Image: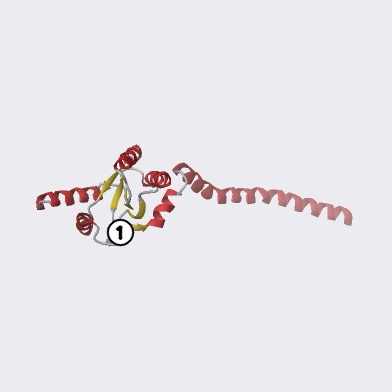
Amino acid sequence: MIKNEKMNKVSLIKQEFANNCGLIFTDHTNLKSDQSVLIRDRLYEVEATLMILKNTLASIAASDFFKDIDLGSTLKGPTSVIISHKDLIKTAKVLKDIIKEFDILKPKGAVIDGKFVSANGVNMLANLPPREVLISQVISGLASPIYKLVSVLSNLPQKLVLTLSAIQKEKEKAS
């Protein structure tokens, strides 16, 4: 490749590294062209793209863009990156489905909010419940102590009445 072409590709990779909500690096061993078309279509549905990387160019772009992250071991062997433009969790779920169906695109790791996440972290993202379920779990977790407090406070007058009633019965027996 001519040097200008390589520099243009590096700047394109940097641009993709900059404009996303998360990157998932994968091993695309045994990926066939017809499969890549199907995969790209599925990723397009969740506003994500698949980019096959040349490791040397990706390493140059990563060293310039990710100063605190060492992607050296991640960028070895056949490497592609899934760039999520909107929802990284939906992208991870689509990747999980792709792995089940085609047995390709094994996760190597991810970069989320400028931090490296291992392949296990990517799998954990894919196994998260949907956003609505997570929100309802947080809300119920916040509401639970309030309900318990209301229950305790509503039982206090009842206990007071029962105690006074028991005292009255004791006095009636004593008289």
- On screen, residue 147 versus residue 127, left or right, reads right
The residue lying at 35 percent from left, 49 percent from top is 105
Residue at which label 1 appears: 74
Residue 61 image position (x, y, % from top left) = 20, 55
Residue 43 image position (x, y, % from top left) = 34, 41
The residue lying at 10 percent from left, 53 percent from top is 3
User: Does residue 34 lie above or below 75 as drawn?
Assistant: above
Q: Nearer the viewer, residue 156 or 170?
A: 156
User: Does residue 93 lie above or below 170 as drawn?
Assistant: above
Q: Nearer the viewer, residue 149 or 97?
A: 97
Q: Nearer the viewer, residue 34 or 111?
A: 34
- Report if residue 163 is visible in the image: yes
Given the image, on which type of amino acid does mark 1 rest? Thr
The residue lying at 72 percent from left, 52 percent from top is 160
Quadrant location of the C terminus in the rendered image: bottom right
Q: Nearer the viewer, residue 116 or 174?
A: 116
- SS class, disc 1: loop
- On screen, residue 65 versus residue 135, left or right, reads left
Q: How many marks?
A: 1
Examine the image and state in which quarter residue 111 appears: bottom left
Residue 125 image position (x, y, % from top left) = 42, 51
Q: Residues within 10 Å of mark 1 (few under 14, many from 20)?
A: some
- Report if residue 24 is visible in the image: no
The colour mode here is secondary structure
